[in-house]
Amino acid sequence: MALADQFDGLLVDLDGVVWLGREPVPGSAETLAALLAAGKEIVFVTNNPARPPARYAERLREMGVEVVPERIVTAGMVAARLAGDAAGRGGSAFVIGESSLKEMVVATGASLLEGEAGREADVVVVSGHRGFDYGELLTAKRALDGGAALVATSHDPTMPMPGGEWPGTGSILAAVETASGRTAEIGGKPERHLFEMALDVLARGSFRTKDVEKEPRERRVAMIGDRIASDIDGGRAAGLATVLVLSGSSSRAQAEAAEPPPDHVIENLAGLLR
C-alpha cells in the first residue's frame, strides 16, 4: 500500500517540498497531479507570504497541478487577519514585507503607514523581504516602544533555495524582537492559526461529503513539509500525522534526532506513491 493511501486529506507545504526557488522538486508535479486524480483532498500551506494565493495557484497550474486559490493558505493571510484584529477599527499598521502582504493587511481595514509615519502605527507586521534595512528596524522599534502590537508571518530563520538556504522571516524578526524586547504573535506554522484555517478549508470542500460526522483531523489528515520546527511540530500539535520530505530544510539525521520524530520520512513527494 502506498503511503498516500493511509490518508484522506493532505496539507502540503510549498517551499522545499513542491519547489526550491523557481525550480520544481523532481517528481513533485507528477505526484500532486496523481494524488488529485485519485481523489485526495489537498490544501497547500506555506509560511512564505511573498505572493497572494492566486499567484501560487497560477504557478502550480503552470506545473500541471490544477488547484484553485481557495485551496492555498499562506502565513501572510493569517498574519494579516491577526494584524487587523490587533489594529482594531480605524487602526493603522506598519508592515515590513512585500507589497502583497501590505495589500492583505489593508484589506482587513487597517490603514497602512509608510516610512517614519509608521512610528505611530497600532500594529507592526514583520515578514521577510530583500529590502529590509535599518530604517525599517528603527521605525518598528519606535512603534513597539509606543505600545504597538507585534505580528509576524513566521519564525523560520531560513528558506530553502537552490544552492543553499537564504535568510528567512525569522532572521529579520530576530532583529525586531531584540531591538524592541517584544515577542511577536506568529501567524504561520507551527502556531495553530494557519492549521485551523487550512482545516476549515478542508471542511468546506468536498472532503466534508465523505464523512460529515467527523472533524477534518479525524479523517486521516497528514501534514507534509520539509522543516521539523514548523511543519512537523506544528502538524503534530494540530493532531495530524506528519510526513517529512528531505528535499528542503531538514535532514534525515535531524529527523532521527527529533523528539518525537516525524511519523514518516521520505526523500521527496514522490515517496507518497510508494
Image (cartoon, helix red, strand yellow):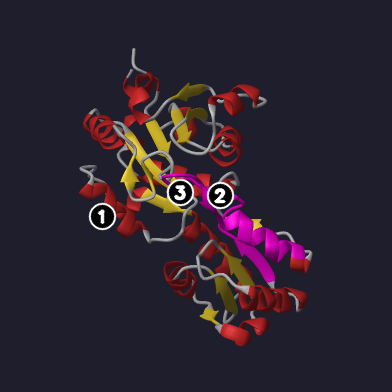
Q: Is residue 216 left or right of residue 34?
A: right
Distance CA(mark 2)–CA(mark 3): 13 Å
| Residue 91 place in picture, x, y as percent | 59, 80
- The answer to whether residue 186 shows anywhere in this view is no
| Residue 4 place in picture, x, y as percent | 36, 23
Q: Earlier in the sequence, mark 2 or mark 1?
A: 1
Q: Secondary structure at mark 1?
A: helix
- According to the image, label 1 marks what residue? 58
Task: Kindly check if marks 3 and 1 are in contact, taking CB atoms under 8 A apart as contact.
Answer: no
Q: Residues within 10 Å of mark 3 (few under 14, many from 20)?
A: many
> Which stretch is magenta?
149-178
- The answer to whether residue 36 shows anywhere in this view is yes
Q: Amino acid at mark 2?
A: Thr
Mark nearer the viewer, 2 or 3: 2
Q: Answer whether residue 17 is magenta in the image.
A: no
The one of 266 and 218 positioned closer to us in this rendering: 266
Q: Amino acid at mark 1?
A: Glu
Residue drawn at (68%, 58%), measured in percent from left and top?
174
| Residue 35 place in picture, x, y as percent | 28, 30
Quadrant position of residue 30: top left
Q: Amino acid at mark 3?
A: Thr
Look at the picture and state if 45 lies above or below 53. above
Q: Earlier in the sequence, mark 2 or mark 3?
A: 3
- According to the image, label 3 marks what residue? 46
- According to the image, label 2 marks what residue? 158
